[in-house]
Amino acid sequence: MSLKDDMALLSERKCYIVGALHILRSEQDLQFALANCMQSTQVLIGLIAKCKKKYSNTKNDLQFIAPLERVLSKLMQQFSLIFAKLTAKEEICIAGVGVVVEAVAVMQTKMVISFLRLYEKYSSDHTVEIIGMTSRIDMLVSFIIGGAMKADGSDVFYKPSCSDDWKRLYSENYLEVVHTASKSFEKKYQELAEDMLALSAAASTGLNDSGLSLGGAIKTGFNTLFYKLFSSQRKKQAELFFSNPNPQKAANILNLLDSKYTKGILKLIMPSIEVNKRIYVPKLLPVLTVENVLSERDLSYFLKEDSKSTEDSSGSKLTEDGFDIVDKPPTYLTKKVKPMPEGYVKIRILSPHKLPSDWNPGKKIDTKGMKFDRIIVDIHGGGFIATSTRCHQTYLRKWATKCNAVVFAIDYKLAPEAQYPVLLDEVWQAYFWIITQAEKEFKVKLKTVIVAGDSAGGNLAIALTLFAIRSNFRVPDGILAAYPALNLSINAFTPSLLASMDDFILRYSFLNVCINYYVPPEADSAKDPYISPTLVTDDDLRRFPPVRLMVAGRDPLRDESFRLLCRLARLKKDAKMVEYRNFPHAFWNLDIVFGLKEAKFATQKTIEWLHELFRMYEEGDAN
């Protein structure tokens, strides 16, 4: 066939594929779509042969072809498997597979066009496009399509808007959808995307594999400016990086925004706060391990007066009322220690007013006129592998000031040096210390304690709540989670996950890095609710406090929050969720100068919900 014939066939086939999938309702529709995709694959194989023949005796680099041929072979195997299951009448999720096949069809179309252009004239731009599409299809074939086949076809994502679940969410005010679409918003969104791609491209060439350095940060700054100015180079380098990201560099990109080199900039854009203090608190309970994290536990043993042998590293003894620290130094450390002492967790305390502590061990504390009874325990995001409480102060300080609350923000250890369940243990130990010690150390009243978290922090916030429930310990009075990572199973599928194919914050390859770094081989993310909180049982959900969720319409993690909200609604729990339809992931961090001005709506809603949760208990009307 000629190139003209190839293009005509492609154009015709694309119309068939898109038309079939948009009206996908039956096995016949899926079989038709699969057959067309398989024919497109044959077109690609033919184009590969033509390009190999044309450029085989030239100096042009054809190394990208071998990986593509392997991916196409895997793709044909998966399609054949789906055909076999349909023929054998085995149960698969037709709607889920159909969505994935549609994505494959789109990528095949783009790849064929790139090959046609490459055949006409060799260009590294076209090879990079093909490398990017190869990586995307490989991810779909290797991980996503298997999860789509096993997906629950009765799930809310595949139900019409007239179904009971959707009616319940809207009519009973569980769900609010906020549209922020405007020309100015979309322009700023695109600028933000370009900035993030420029930073990713720059960091991939400017940062080394071991960690951050001043030289690397400076080089990355200059490279970012270069890639910001030259869009074709930005797109090419970012595509190459995302196709096969170096895990350490992926973490360094986020850490660069949270490093000492950007500390001065953060100070300029953050609101002022009266108290901003870091402390190190001792772990007071047995350490969680993969072997014991799922075992049943009851903390009543640790709270009995006769458990006198239980001591923390400062020598304080645990009694029925907590730790007996009368006439003793505080149980926390305030000096900077590098590395952090073993057996301690770092917490950042933010308060709009001076706390009844001079932060010096052993000195008398004046508590006259002091009253603090609104407590927020925050767990920051960062994919389990990056950032700290430092860069999250952009919104935490607003919470503290607007809600007149004391914020305890936990700086847990990061993967891969610390894997599951170490991060959960760090958060759990810090939470236990806050509940048992904060009142004595700072004279704060633990009348209302809200646990909040974003992204990976949202995962840990819900896992922490579940752990407190199962341990018969004080459960938080409310949960506030933004765009939480609720399912870390590598084979789990929801339609929104396909957005990760091109997302400028949560690219599919970055998600894989985060999961592989955080979840050790011996843990099972498909069964463990502390890794994937979406697996929590209904019995446990019934014991959950009021839940408030925020999601972004452009976020690959979005759908799992819908799934959780539906379950809470079916159980008649106090739960609400707002979806900002046009927002990207991480919008809490974007309510800053040069960020997205519309992100202020999410900040305002967050503060409104915090006030609502606090008032429930202040007025004594919580269920």
Image (cartoon, rainbow, N blue to C red):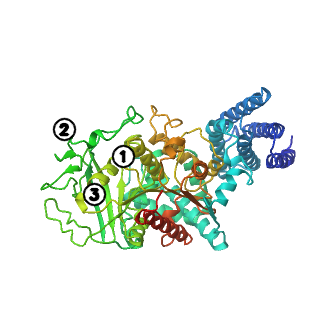
Disc 3 residue crowd, few under 14, some 14–19, many 20+, Cα 10 Å: some
Q: Which element is circle 1 on?
A: loop
Residue under the image location 19 percent in, 56 percent down: 330
Amino acid tagged 3: Ala
Q: Is residue 410 above or below residue 534?
A: below
Between 232 and 540, the one nearer to me in the picture = 540
Q: CA distance from mark 2 to mark 1?
A: 20 Å
Against 405, is 139 above or below? above
Kindly indicate whether the residue at mark 1 contacts the one at mark 2 (C-beta within 8 angstroms).
no
Quarter assignment of residue 179: bottom right
Is residue 61 visible in the rendered image? The answer is no
How packed is label 1: few (under 14 Cα within 10 Å), some, or many (20 or more)? some
Q: Which residue is mark 1?
A: 473
Q: Position of residue 604 (x, y in %)?
A: 51, 70
Residue type indicated by callout 2: Ser
Which residue bears the numbered disc 3?
438
Q: CA distance from mark 1 to mark 3?
A: 16 Å
Front tag of 1 and 3: 1
Q: Amino acid at mark 1?
A: Phe
Return the disc, 2 or 1, that comes first in the chain's sequence.
2
43 and 54: which one is in front?
A: 43
Q: CA distance from mark 2 to mark 3?
A: 22 Å
Task: Tell me where residue 193 appears, x and y as whole percent.
Answer: 58, 62
Q: In this picture, is 28 found above or below 195? A: above
Residue 385, percent from left and from top: 43, 48
Dot 2 or dot 3: first in sequence order is 2
Q: Residue at x 43, y 60 (%)?
A: 257
Tag 3 secondary structure: helix
Residue identified by numbered label 2: 309
Left or right: residue 412 versus residue 127 is: left
**Callout 2–callout 3 Cβ contact below 8 Å:** no
